[in-house]
Amino acid sequence: MPATKRHMNWTNVTFTPSGGTATTYTGVLSLKIEAGGTLAKFSGDGDRYPTTIVSEMSEPTVTIRCADIAATRANAIGTVGTLTATHNDARNGSGSGAITYTLSNAVIASQATSGDHRNFGQAILTFVAFSADGTTNPLSASAAS
């Protein structure tokens, strides 16, 4: 079946610490990928608007919200590794049209756990990343064909 170009639900969400064993996050409620970064703007003389704008820094961030609290607590803040997650095609699941994101040099930046009365508990885990050479984006995506 052809890809729908519509995506629904996340699967295969894992974090593998450098030299360690993969941790799989289940019960994923949401996963947010932000390219992040800042822009440097220049204006001078009598300019009333910027005349030059450049991307001066990029800082990708991934935030996972899931019910699998134990998995989110399996690795300490500051742990470095590789994060992968597949955003499923609405009709084909993890097959044709699904997009797999990889965050290399991912660093666990924060962990939060919550639970309300008469509701399922959940955790929020945030990853940031660094570039190995300062120019290669640690965030990549590939679509299944």
Image: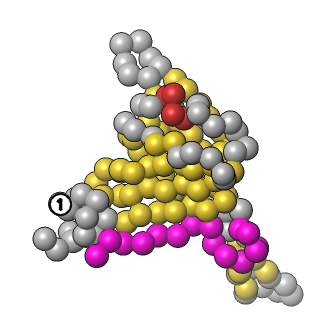
Report the magenta residues as a range.
131-145
Tag 1: Cα neighbours inside 10 Å, few (<14), some, or many (≥20)?
some
- Quadrant containing the C terminus is bottom left
What secondary structure do most residues of the magenta stretch adopt? Answer: loop
- Quadrant containing the N terminus is bottom left
In the figure, is residue 65 to the left or right of 18?
left
Label 1: element kind: loop
In the figure, is residue 9 to the left or right of 73?
left
* Residue at numbered disc 1: 91
Q: Quadrant of residue 112?
A: top right
Q: Compared with residue 8, is residue 137 higher up or lower down, i.e. above or below?
A: below
Q: Amino acid at mark 1?
A: Arg
Q: Nearer the viewer, residue 48 or 121?
A: 121
Q: Is residue 141 magenta?
A: yes
Q: Is residue 68 magenta?
A: no
Residue 96 percent coordinates (x, y): 25, 69
Let me know if residue 49 appears in the view.
no
